Amino acid sequence: MNAEHWIDLTRHPSTRTESVRAIQVRVRRSANSELQLTFRLDGDIPRILVPSSSAPRIGTDLWRHTCFEAFIQVQGQPAYHEFNFAPSGEWCVYALSGYRNGAPLADEAMRPHITLHSTNSRLDLEAVVRLDTLSAIHSRAFLRIGLSAVIEASDGLSYWALRHPADKPDFHNPDSFALPLEPPVR
């Protein structure tokens, strides 16, 4: 399946916010190794704490503030990559050999292209990832994708994902990699 339609993320039940009404994501996978992710946050945007714009660069601890995330795993493999996309333009990629076992990659070749559009009621963040920078197989393999967001607002942090399989928010749980993506048609 390739998700050309909007997919709803759900808020983890342990977190509350009135600032965010909904978060949706649209995923497109192209034959030229691009994975395009558009995160759409509907809510009271002036109450969302959005990091100031900066030059695109590798960031640290982006998940502690408003941040959108994608987890990319080749079907049947324990290894996966985590991408963090901040509205500021900062980004980070982690290579993990298994559940939470890995480290950030300081490789500018992996830099996603991030654009942001915002109004008082909607924030759209688009990120384009080159799958061939992860490995040659990522471009043509069946993938499992996890999509999530951490939203920092004046009324607290909330955690959003495709699926929340645990009592506490845990985006690394393999059961949350709930979007299957078929290889592109070439």
Image (tube, helix red, strand yellow):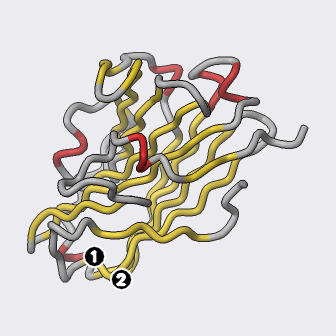
Q: How many marks?
A: 2
Query: Which tag, 1 or 2, sits closer to the chain's start?
Result: 1
In the rendered view, tell whether residue 30 sits above or below residue 46.
above
In what element is the residue under mark 2? loop
> Dot 2: within a 10 Å radius of its alpha carbon, few (fewer than 14), some, or many (20 or more) residues?
some
Kindly identify the residue that appears in the image at 33 percent across and 28 percent down. Answer: 99
Is residue 90 visible to us here?
yes
Mark 1 lies on residue: 45
Query: Residue 129: x percent and y percent?
Result: 57, 37
Crowdedness of circle 1 by 10 Å Cα count: few (<14), some, many (20+)? some
Let me know if residue 118 appears in the view: no
Q: Mark 2 sits on what residue?
A: 121
Q: Position of residue 13 (x, y in %)?
A: 21, 70
Seen in the picture, residue 37 relative to 15 is either above or below; the reply is above
Residue 89 relative to residue 138: left or right: left
Q: Nearer the viewer, residue 114 or 147?
A: 147
Q: Quadrant of the C terminus?
A: top right
Furthest-right residue in this view: 186
- Percent across and percent down for residue 15 are 16, 68
At a point 44% along the width and 60% down the height, the residue shown is 162
Outermost left residue? 155
Q: Residue at point 17% right, 61% down? A: 152
Amino acid marked by disc 2: Ser
Find the distance from the CA under tag 1 to the CA under tag 2. 6 Å
